[in-house]
Amino acid sequence: MAVRIIWTNTAVNQRRKILNYWNKRNKSKTYSRKLVLEITQRINFLINNPEIYIKTNFPDVRTSTLGHYNIFYKTTPTELIVIAFWDNRRNPKVLSKILKK
């Protein structure tokens, strides 16, 4: 059965801001493209191995570390839902509010 990948608006906005930051900082899209490839590869891995990564203190939420970033996600039998794409250098209190929703 195919698993559908769903990115929440929050996760999409976080990823977009991170990619835009690197585009401006480096004056190039090279690193952003590399990061997008790594994210895609990790998401594809998660589809086949959803329970391999760490459970969080939030119900049904797991997290996968990807360098300075974490992908917070939930799974159902037919979906992988990306809740947040988090830069670990940010204030964790903000993340806590996002995951409580």
Image (tube, grey):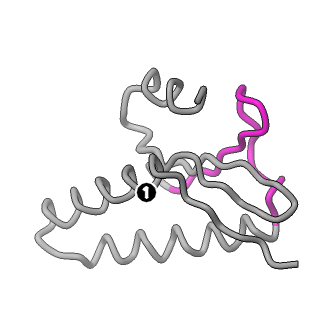
Query: Which residue sits at x=65%, y=67%?
Result: 5
Element type at mark 1 = helix
Judge from the rendering whether residue 95 lies leftward or rightward of residue 41; answer left or right: left
Amino acid of disc 1: Val
Query: Which residue sits at x=52%, y=67%?
Result: 39
Judge from the rendering whether residue 62 lies leftward or rightward of residue 52; answer left or right: left
Crowd class of label 1 (few under 14; some 14 to 19; many from 20; radius 10 Å): some
Judge from the rendering whether residue 91 lies leftward or rightward of residue 23; answer left or right: right
Magenta span: chief secondary structure: loop
Query: Which residue sits at x=88%, y=78%?
Result: 1
Query: Which residue sits at x=64%, y=51%?
Result: 64
Residues 83 and 32: in front is: 83
**What's drawn in magenta, residue-wise?**
49-66
Would you place residue 84 above or below residue 5 in this image? above
Percent position of residue 35, x then y: 41, 69
Percent position of residue 65, x then y: 58, 50
Pointer 1 residue: 12
- Which of the 4 quarters of the picture holds residue 52? bottom right
- Which of the 4 quarters of the picture holds residue 16? bottom left
